[in-house]
Image: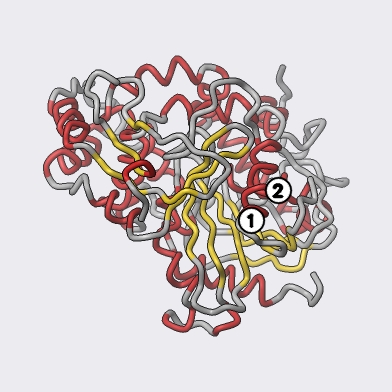
Amino acid sequence: MSMPLRASANTVPPDGSRRHFLVGIAGGALAGAAMIGSDAAAQTNPVQLPRVTEAITPFRVVTASAAINDARRRLQATRWPERQTANDWRQGVPLATMQALIAHWRTGYDWRRLERRLNAHPQFRTEIDGLGIHFLHVRSPHEQARPIILTHGWPGSIVEFLNVIDPLTNPTKHGGRPEDAFHVVIPSLPGFGYSDKPTASGWGLPRIARAWSALMRRLGYTDYFAQGGDWGAGVTTWMAKQHVEGLTAIHLNLPILFPPPVEGQPSDAEKAAIAQLVAFNDKKSAYAKIQSTRPQTIGYALADSPAGQAAWIYEKLGEWTDSNYEPEREISRDEMLDNISLYWLTNSAASSARLYYESFAADFSTQRLDVPVAVSVFPGEVFQPPRLWGERVYSRLFYWNNAAHGGHFAAFEQPAIFVEELRAAFRALPRGG
């Protein structure tokens, strides 16, 4: 199934789904702690997550030394491929670049850094729709603060948001005003991090959206915002599509606006956006096609090799940040390894990839929304749709801004700009929504 859009950016696919467009053209007790690697024989499930009920249960990460030692042993034994035959990233992460990252991960990175960073914030787990969901919940000292739920994507995690928590919850310490304050909820997607891994199909974006609604109700929030990029944008969009109870407005840093809506002859801005999607499909979408069709197969390789898992993620950090393939310019090497380590220590390569299998074909698609929508477009994003498309699809679009710097991992790369975008967006929200 293909359409000849490579030859012409004026051709429009039959619907707004990613599949049709891209395929066609392109502090708790021990019972509440995660024990990582406590049983060396439990290779397929190194994290022994505590069972939970609907109660909000405090949670802490506890990393066993055996898990760290096993990772170092595997990194030391990495069998490397030969050098690439191109002098850039066209064939993937260059060999020397990858070897330097792995050397630092093995000998220079503090493996307990991630544990300390996560345990510095209140963490919890609760059962929703049969699945244990992990989340951070940080309340602002400003009681009038507005609740917001932030959702990460792939290959990201809750780590993306760690540097924006304090500015969002305590704005007066970070150049903001008391009325800029948020109570922040940051869940781990099902199959990611310390959330449970689904054991049956069905956990796609619409179901996750309902689960997030249940989580916010359980936390007592009856009037709140939602924000997301990547898969987080998909979850947030579906929350708006479903009109989940209590949702007042949303903010997206990757608006899901795949053509249509193109009406008549595309403008120059529309042609540029279509060209970006064509280039993405032609050159940079292999990971998505593999994960949306064979997540189990790729999971075997990534679950066995920390170097492989690191390369699979680091490539995207290089390509999708606003860094010209130098991601350390935007995100510190240790912070990138915090994110990579979370995938490795929770053995979530396959379970996170299955979200592509569940939702990439149809759910990650253009949806007409009639709740208030704010959009921030970052210049290093892989796809930058024009405002015109947002106006045609979001009937209550109240904010659209092109940020000065940053890419796909907006909060991770440019936390200060990301925070200011959220502040500016929700200041602009009309009274009464």
At horizontal 34% and vertical 20% (from top left) the residue drawn is: 44
In the rendered image, which residue does mark 2 sit on? 237
Q: Nearer the viewer, residue 198 or 354?
A: 198
Q: Are marks 2 and 1 in contact (CB under 8 Å)?
A: yes
Q: Is residue 168 above or below residue 52?
A: below
Q: Quadrant of the N terminus?
A: top right
**Residue 272: x percent and y percent?**
65, 48
Q: Quadrant of the C terminus?
A: bottom right
* Residue 29 image offset from top left, x and y in percent: 34, 48
Residue at the image point whose x is 71% and y is 37% from the top: 206
Task: Identify which amino acid the numbered label 2 is placed on.
Answer: Thr
User: In this rendering, does residue 310 appear at all?
Assistant: no
Question: In this figure, which residue is indicated by the disc labeled 1?
Answer: 252
Foreground of the two, 119 or 414: 119
Task: Please tell me which residue is depicted at 47% across the width and 76% down the height of the picture.
Answer: 170
Q: Is residue 118 left or right of residue 417?
A: left
Give the quadrant of residue 130. top right
Name the colouring of the figure: secondary structure
Amino acid under label 1?
Answer: Leu
Describe residue 46's horizontal placement relative to residue 257 as left or right: left
Point out residue 118 in the picture as x, y percentages from the top left corner. Answer: 35, 53
Q: Quadrant of residue 253?
A: bottom right
Secondary element at tag 2: helix
Q: Nearer the viewer, residue 259 or 303?
A: 303
